[in-house]
Image (cartoon, rainbow, N blue to C red):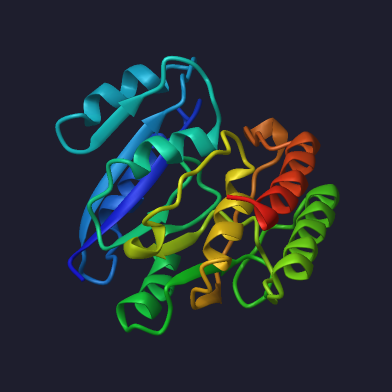
């Protein structure tokens, strides 16, 4: 394996985009060449204009209307050329250094897909908002029940995929229901899916967090929908 594609969905992250890009630049992804793909989902806080400065170094794409995280990832997936794909939110809730342990399992042919779990207690994790923790555990429990697995953190952003696993997968979800959809579709492929502990520096709504209880409802529907259809 020679290259890793790092997908960065972006929406209104003017205060963190430079910091996360610096972290991605300075992080060693097991020696792999880095292909960074940014997709702006119609930011209105100056992020969209600021991304112009990155166009000569990375692949940068712009949506002409706000569609959601899933739509941004779908756009990026049509442009990846790496042997592994990972997802990096443009905030600072996740630290790219944690990706090393995920992608090593793929490089060493131990896994096809690896999730980074925030809930093992093995690494630093900011206290979750209670409702978010409850929702996360419920969604993960439903995933395990429907798909016969034992995940601890289905909703995690940190997911690493062998690129060949993604072949033939078409993402239909536009918002945060991307997470259950991609999980459903890779599990139905009977891939080797592992979890490893990661750190988590979660935000509150006052700090820019965007996911709400409504996204939890959409996630439940996605788990049910994609269990029985493509």
Q: Position of residue 130 (x, y in %)?
A: 85, 52
> In terms of image quadrants, where is residue 161?
bottom left
Residue occupying image coordinates x 22% and y 52%: 81
Q: Residue furthest front?
A: 229
Q: Is residue 198 left or right of residue 50?
A: right
Q: Is residue 216 left or right of residue 12?
A: right
Q: Position of residue 204 (x, y in %)?
A: 70, 40
> In terms of image quadrants, where is residue 9?
top left
Residue occupying image coordinates x 63% and y 65%: 118
Q: Position of residue 90 (x, y in %)?
A: 46, 40
Which is nearer the eye, 158 or 54?
158
- Is residue 45 placed above or below 35 in the rendered structure? above
| Number of on-image labels | 0
Q: Is residue 137 left or right of residue 203?
A: right
Which is nearer the eye, 201 or 219?
219
Looking at the figure, which quarter contains the N terminus? bottom left
Q: Residue furthest left?
A: 56
Residue occupying image coordinates x 29% and y 65%: 29
Q: Position of residue 48 (x, y in %)?
A: 38, 20
Residue occupying image coordinates x 36% and y 40%: 76
- Is residue 164 placed above or below 39 in the rendered structure? below
């Amino acid at each position: 394996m020679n290259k890793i594609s790092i997908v960065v969905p972006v929406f209104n992250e003017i205060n963190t985009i430079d910091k996360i890009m610096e972290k991605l630049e300075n992080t060693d992804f097991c020696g792999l060449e880095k292909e960074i793909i940014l997709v702006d989902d119609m930011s209105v806080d100056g992020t969209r204009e600021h991304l112009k400065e990155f166009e000569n170094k990375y692949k940068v794409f712009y949506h002409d209307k706000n569609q959601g995280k899933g739509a941004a990832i779908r756009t990026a997936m049509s442009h990846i050329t790496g042997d592994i794909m990972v997802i990096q939110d443009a905030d600072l809730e996740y630290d790219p250094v944690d990706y090393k342990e995920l992608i090593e399992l793929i490089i060493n042919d131990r896994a096809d897909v690896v999730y980074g779990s925030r809930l093992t207690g093995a690494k630093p994790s900011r206290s979750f908002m209670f409702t978010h923790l409850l929702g996360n555990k419920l969604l993960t429990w439903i995933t395990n029940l429907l798909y016969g697995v034992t995940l601890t953190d289905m909703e995690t952003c940190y997911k690493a995929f062998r690129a060949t696993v993604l072949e033939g997968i078409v993402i239909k979800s536009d918002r945060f229901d991307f997470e259950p959809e991609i999980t459903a579709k890779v599990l139905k492929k009977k891939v080797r899916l592992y979890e490893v502990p990661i750190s988590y520096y979660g935000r509150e709504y006052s700090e820019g967090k965007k996911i709400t209880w409504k996204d939890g409802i959409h996630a439940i529907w996605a788990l049910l929908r994609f269990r029985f259809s493509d």
